Image (spheres, rainbow, N blue to C red):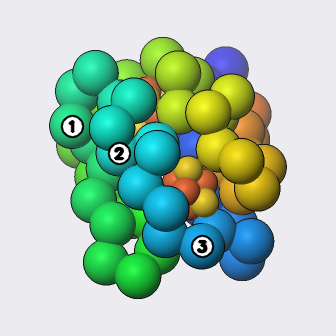
Amino acid sequence: MERRIFIGDTCVGCAFCMLVCPYNAIEVFGRARVDYEICNACMKCVACCPNSAIEVVETVETEA
Ligand code: SF4
Ligand code: SF4
């Protein structure tokens, strides 16, 4: 099981999540964008969003 975050439509680009992220995995250009190469799903950004725009999705990795 793997967790991943997604930025939802309610993002207003306030950049709180960018400031909170300890890995600098978020950039904000009007709206937040996540660099999944860097994000390690620590979830620190999720609680800081004033608009609850950051969603957590659990994914099941399947072997090919
Ligand atoms: S904290 Fe929430 S509203 Fe602000 S930029 Fe991040 S995702 Fe968007
Ligand atoms: S889950 Fe953690 S590493 Fe990923 S963007 Fe949010 S604060 Fe940064």
Q: Quadrant of residue 61?
A: top right
Q: Are marks 2 and 1 in contact (CB under 8 Å)?
A: yes
**Which residue is label 3 attached to?**
12
Q: Position of residue 48 (x, y in %)?
A: 62, 33
Q: Residue at x 60, y 73 (%)?
A: 12
Mark 1 CB lies closer than 8 A to ligand 2: yes
**In the image, is residue 29 above or below residue 59?**
below
Counting from the top left corner in percent of width and height, residue 38 is at 23, 36
Separation of residues labelled 3 and 2 (CA atoms)? 13 Å
* Rendering quadrant holding ligand 1: bottom right
Q: Which residue is mark 2?
A: 18
Residue occupying the point 35% across, 45% down: 18
Q: How far across and down, in percent of the image, does residue 4 sit?
A: 57, 38
Instruction: Tell me if residue 10 can be seen.
Output: yes
Q: Earlier in the sequence, mark 1 or mark 3?
A: 3
Mark closer to the observer (1, 3): 3
Q: Are marks 1 and 3 in contact (CB under 8 Å)?
A: no
Determine the secondary structure under disc 1: loop
- 42 or 51, which is in the foreground? 51
Ligand 1 neighbours mark 2 (CB distance < 8 Å): yes
The crowd level at tag 1 (other Cα within 10 Å; few <14, some 14-19, many 20+) is some
The reply to whether discs 3 and 2 touch (Cβ–Cβ < 8 Å) is no
Q: Which residue is mark 1?
A: 24
In the picture, measured across the screen, residue 39 lies left or right of residue 44, that is left
Mark 3 residue element: loop
**Can residue 62 be seen in the rendering of this structure?**
no
Furthest toward the bottom, the residue is 30
* Mark closer to the chain start, 2 or 1: 2
Q: CA distance from mark 1 to mark 3?
A: 19 Å
Q: Picture coordinates of residue 9 (x, y %)?
A: 72, 76
Q: Residues within 10 Å of mark 2 (few under 14, many from 20)?
A: many
